[in-house]
Amino acid sequence: MCSKSYSQQAIRFFTVIIFLIIGVIACSWLQLKQPPTPDVYKISRDQYQHKLEGFWLGQNIANWTGLITEMDKVGTPETMPFYTDEDWGAKDQVAMWGEYVPHAGHIEFYFQPAGTAWGADDDTDIEYMYLHLHHDLRVSKLSAEQIRQGWLSHIYSEKDAPLYKKFPDSEPQIENFLWESNQQARLLMEQGVLPPQTSEPANNPKYNMIDAQLTTEIFGLLAPGRPDIALDIAYLPIRTTAKYDAQWIAEFYIVMHSLAAIVDSTKNVKQQSQWLAEQASQYLPEGSSPEAVYRFVKDHYQNNPDKSDWESTRDAIYTRYQLTTNDGYQYNQPFDAVINFAASLVSLFYGEGDIVRTLQIGTLVGWDSDNPTATWGGLLGFILGHQEVKKAFKITTVSDAYWIHRTRRNFPDLTPNRPGENTFIGMSQMGLEVIDRLVSDPVIGQLDADNGYWNIKK
């Protein structure tokens, strides 16, 4: 009996061993058959160039469309009622400073005709300057002194700026196209002050204005798929003009632009844009005003059964953040980073990835309307690519030239036989070369020049 019992135990033991061996072999075979989880982002340079062209085109369309209503509506609905969808196509109203824009009389999309050049404005010109500095200095990260020298070289002061006539019959006046925190930072640089001291509240009382949002988004695109690298190289440019809320909001946009390079292209643009926003929101400090504002606007949108009624969320922002103090934010000026962040999110969520609808809402929403609009025009333009941007707006021809010397100085004229000093293709190629240098750092990735790809480490 014992012998038989031991034999049965032995059979069971060896049977288990055999099944274990078969299981190990099967698992190994399956692992060999399945490709290993990639540890890099593989990004096509050619496709990225088309996306960068889309960024510049979308940003310029949005910038010059949003300028039509810039500061028309700054939260005084009793005397200056907010715009609504009914105002699209209507006559433009006067801005808070008592002026109209020279390039359009009605609230509608603006397209610069082919054969002319898009004029530089504060939403694009300092980003162009930073791109130029990275490209010509051949560095992946600018030093504080390089930023200071770049600003002093390429940005006019209030003393040496040329005379500017807004309208043919208006009086010419000195205009250096700097406002709020940017202007204060430029003055400090003249005195030898370097970033980040140029954004310290003790030196710059405008540190919480919108300025950094419109000058630093491009750093996200210069570090595809790597928001950690993007925030690192953008730190000093952000801290040139911003701290605290304004700094964190600028970082939010940079993260979105960086992650746009690796967003799931099988999803529709609504899903892509909302995923990007949710990822970027995780970088907002917990308990900060921007983090609370993000949750408030997102919740208001999600709980609104009528997704065409963006006006109700905008009005709720006015009540919660301008009329009263909430979430640690106290309204100061219509240039505040926080109030414009809230307005920006209205067009992002209700636009639902449609670049046309997003820019329309952004133009009508109020406050500093050209800045958030330009942000989404650039981001959605990047996601779509330049051909899809034109298709979305149902235009076949539009300018691809850029006139940086409208607002800034001392840049080479790279298109001497054409209007402006550069083209969107040329600007995109500059961006590719800057990324080539960044990606060639073995810590970050590898440039596969033969096959036209970047392999960027996750």
Image (cartoon, helix red, strand yellow):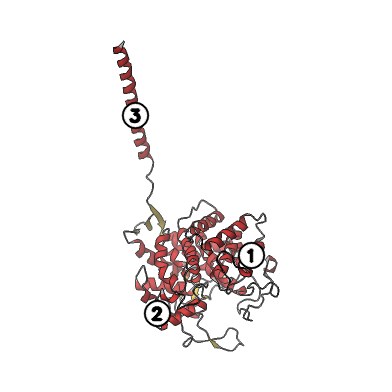
Dot in front, 2 or 3: 2
| Label 1 Cα neighbours within 10 Å, binned few <14 / some 14-19 / many ≥20 | many
Residue at point 41% right, 73% down?
Answer: 196
Q: Earlier in the sequence, mark 2 or mark 3?
A: 3
Q: Which residue is mark 2?
A: 193
Q: Residue furthest bottom?
A: 171
Q: Is residue 451 left or right of residue 266?
A: left
Q: What is the secondary structure assignment of the residue under circle 1?
A: helix
Do the numbered discs 1 and 3 sit on residues whose CB atoms are within 8 Å? Answer: no
From the image, which quarter does the N terminus lie in? top left
Residue 20 tag number = 3
- Cα separation, mark 2 vs mark 3, equals 70 Å
Q: Nearer the viewer, residue 6 or 213?
A: 6
Q: Nearer the viewer, residue 233 or 283?
A: 283
Q: What is the secondary structure assignment of the residue under circle 2?
A: loop
Quarter-of-image position of residue 373 = bottom right
Q: Earlier in the sequence, mark 1 or mark 2?
A: 2
Q: Is residue 76 left or right of residue 298?
A: right
Does 359 sit above or below residue 240?
above
Q: Identify the amino acid type marked 3.
A: Leu
Q: Which residue is mark 1?
A: 314
